[in-house]
Amino acid sequence: MNVWHCLLAATLALGVPPKNSKEPSFQTTSKDHHLKLAQAIAETCHLATNSTASGLPYALFGIEETSNSQTSIVKGVGGYALEPSLAEAYFVLHRTLSSTKGENRGTPQKYQQYAWELASAIRRYSRVNETEGYSATMDSDQLPPVPTTPLRQPPHFISGTLKYLYLTLAPADCLPLDRWVFNVAGHPLPICANAGGGADKGTFGCSGGGV
């Protein structure tokens, strides 16, 4: 499994109806299944990340099901290129689980903890120094991880990874998903139907406060 595949968790979760949805019950039931699948994918990605010595995701990892039906990581390889896919999955699942109807939707707050763990690992092991920013790493299971040569901080790290980690910990009225859509680069765009109903706030709807 590629770490970019963790993005599928966000894709599935975005299709889940909100609390005030008027969709027919059969559609809601189908999307409830999609949400459970999204949570399972995110848990697998989190398990893979936690299995590394650094707490940074592998580039590739294998998975298998044990005899007691628990998922375990076979072995991962490669380092972390500061991709936003895992952070986006945490962000979307946290917001979706906090705003959907129905029971057994899991615990939204745990994705904030996952996001904090990832942010802490990035700051500890991907930061080059106080003046040169961050770099992708060669091996997530090595302590400390060796940065790539030459040092490489991809543009999606700021536009996507850091943004999604921040939003996971930010108040729910900061770029709400019913008013904003994010493009592949992580840039927020107002949903046209809501362009005159709050999506045009200069602060993107963010109420501020500590994160």
Image (spheres, grey):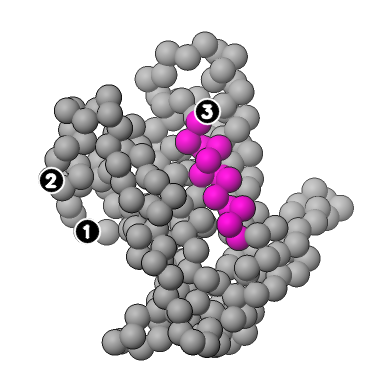
51 lies left or right of 145? right
Specify which label sits upstream in the sequence, 2 or 1.
2
Q: Would you name the residue on which mark 3 appears? A: 103
64 lies left or right of 154? right
Quarter of the picture holding the N terminus: bottom right
Q: Main structural element of the magenta stretch: helix, strand or loop?
A: helix
- Which residue lies at the image location 40% right of the left edge and 54% below the top edge? 185
Q: Is residue 201 above or below residue 116?
A: above
Q: Is residue 153 above or below residue 10?
A: below
* Residues under numbered marks 2 and 3 in contact, where contact means CB atoms less than 8 Å apart: no
Q: Indicate the quadrant where residue 52 lies.
A: bottom right
> 10 Å neighbourhood of mark 3: few (<14), some, or many (≥20)?
few
- Which residue lies at the image location 56% right of the left edge and 17% below the top edge? 27
For the residue labelled by badge 1, is the local secondary structure a helix, a strand or a loop?
loop
**Residue 38 location in percent, x, y?**
59, 41
Q: Would you name the residue on which mark 1 appears? A: 210
- Which residue lies at the image location 62% right of the left edge and 84% below the top edge? 142
Q: Would you name the residue on which mark 2 appears? A: 202
> 10 Å neighbourhood of mark 2: few (<14), some, or many (≥20)?
few
**Residue 170 location in percent, x, y?**
29, 52
Specify which label sits upstream in the sequence, 3 or 1.
3
Q: CA distance from mark 3 to mark 1?
A: 30 Å
Q: Indicate the quadrant where residue 39 lies.
A: top right
Q: Amino acid at mark 1?
A: Gly
Q: Amino acid at mark 3?
A: Glu
Q: Amino acid at mark 2?
A: Gly
Seen from the viewer's position, the closer of residues 97 and 107 is 97
- Which residue lies at the image location 44% right of the left edge and 37% below the top edge? 96
Residue 91 numbered tag: none
160 lies left or right of 141? left
* Residue stretch rendered in magenta on the structure: 3-15
Quarter of the picture holding the C terminus: bottom left
